[in-house]
Image (tube, rainbow, N blue to C red):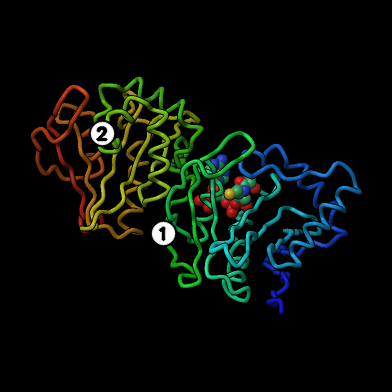
Amino acid sequence: MGISVPPTPELTLADGLTLMPPRLEDAASYYAALRRNDQRLRSWLPKPALPSDGHEEQIEMTKLLSMMETGYLHAWLMVKDGSIVGSIGLGGISVEEARPGIAYWIDVEHEGMGLMARSLEPVVSWALGPRGLAQVEFQVATGNMRSHAVLRRLGLTPEGIRRSSLKLPDRVHDAVVYVASKSHWPPEHQSQLDSAIKVDDENLLRRLAPDDAPAVRALAAHNTGRLLRWLHWMPNQKVAKNHDRLVTALIERSLVSREVTYTVIHEGQLAGCVTLCEPDSDNASEVSFLLSKNSNGKYGVVGCVNVMLDFAFSQLDVSRVQIRSLATDQEHASIPKALGFQYECSLKNAGRSIDGYVDLEIYSMTATRWENR
Ligand SMILES: CC(C)(COP(=O)(O)OP(=O)(O)OC[C@H]1O[C@@H](n2cnc3c(N)ncnc32)[C@H](O)[C@@H]1OP(=O)(O)O)[C@@H](O)C(=O)NCCC(=O)NCCS
């Protein structure tokens, strides 16, 4: 006797958005929507089978519907104002498969409106509820910053990085794995900074992304003497010598931990990077920054660091934030001073540069001092 599988439900969201199980008569409009987005989707999703004519479309849709009948796959069309604007698939469901996977895409004209995060929430709730699954998994290429932002908004935290596990049309990618589990659903809301934060009319903070690698390389090349201030970000000297790998390492760390790195965009140009480190076991954090030469104090850097501090104290509830400064670099030290940090001490040989050990100055801000500033 077969196990009865709950049918894929229609899920209605606010603002005229509905998640509808596909029907045979949706074939033409579904494949037309997929075709419009084909090039763009190839960067992040396995190449879909795109039928060449109406007859082929009917055959492909029939195959999809029969997979849905077996319970191996559940699919939804995202329908807004009568048009198909994307789709979501929950697939790989079998007795042997511990973790079925969810894949999704949205039409380019509907991107960036928060539709996907809102749509995934009821899908996961149904999968872990009425559908009876214990876990569902998301595999996202490390460079797919939009998709990471969606899963963060959903409240999911990555489980880790699966190396060379995601075969996409261009190459094999490393993938970050997110898991939604019945025992932890819905997840606790975690405070997070937006992907882009307007600081003032001239300055924007934007989450570091793979496309920033050339600009970060140029920034680092112009600041070789000052790279010390980035030293604790660098897992080792080999990474320090290869700035592309440095960007990858920083992005990966911001995906799998609560450390986060933003670029400082001044009048459209990358003028620096700011990192807020994951709070340690004593609930203290650290802010580091690399600025374009002579940009200290200018380019709203103080304002940018201020945004990170505000988040650290008011949302993460850290007890203390530290800034380490090269003892000989008063320009760098001017930033914590301008923000009201307190000079604490000088540490002998506490920093290691490519040329050897150097003294560092420690500046601190406590939660109480921040509140009373
Ligand atoms: C990933 C995708 C589904 C996101 O859908 P969406 O409806 O635009 O997502 P949302 O509007 O809910 O969220 C977009 C997030 O990306 C951020 N974002 C927007 N543009 C960005 C960019 N150029 N780089 C990085 N992040 C960006 C937004 O700020 C938002 O983050 P926030 O909530 O922290 O502010 C959509 O971009 C897509 O279809 N991409 C191609 C297919 C794909 O990647 N599928 C997923 C495979 S794992």
Where is mark 1, residue-wise? 191
Is label 1 in a helix, a strand or a loop? Answer: loop
Amino acid found under the numbered disc labelled 1: Ser
Q: Tag 1 or tag 2, which sits nearer the N-term?
A: 1
| Residue pictured at 40% horizontal, 46% vertical | 254
Q: CA distance from mark 2 to mark 1?
A: 27 Å
Q: Is residue 312 left or right of 79 when viewed as pictured?
A: left
Q: 37 or 93, which lies in front?
A: 93
Q: Is residue 366 left or right of 131 when viewed as pictured?
A: left
Indicate whether 73 appears above or below 130: above
Q: Quadrant of residue 42?
A: top right
The crowding category of the residue bearing disc 2, from other C-alpha atoms within 10 Å (few below 14, some 14 to 19, many at least 20), is some
Q: Is residue 112 visible?
A: no
Where is mark 2, residue-wise? 231
Indicate whether 242 appears above or below 348: above
Amino acid found under the numbered disc labelled 2: Leu
Quarter holding the N terminus is bottom right
| Residue pictured at 69% horizontal, 44% vertical | 108
The crowding category of the residue bearing disc 1, from other C-alpha atoms within 10 Å (few below 14, some 14 to 19, many at least 20), is some
| Residue pictured at 38% horizontal, 44% vertical | 253
Residue 59's spot in the image, x, y percent?
A: 86, 53
Q: Residue furthest front?
A: 1
Is label 2 in a helix, a strand or a loop? Answer: helix
Q: 12 or 314, which lies in front?
A: 12
Q: Quadrant of residue 73?
A: bottom right
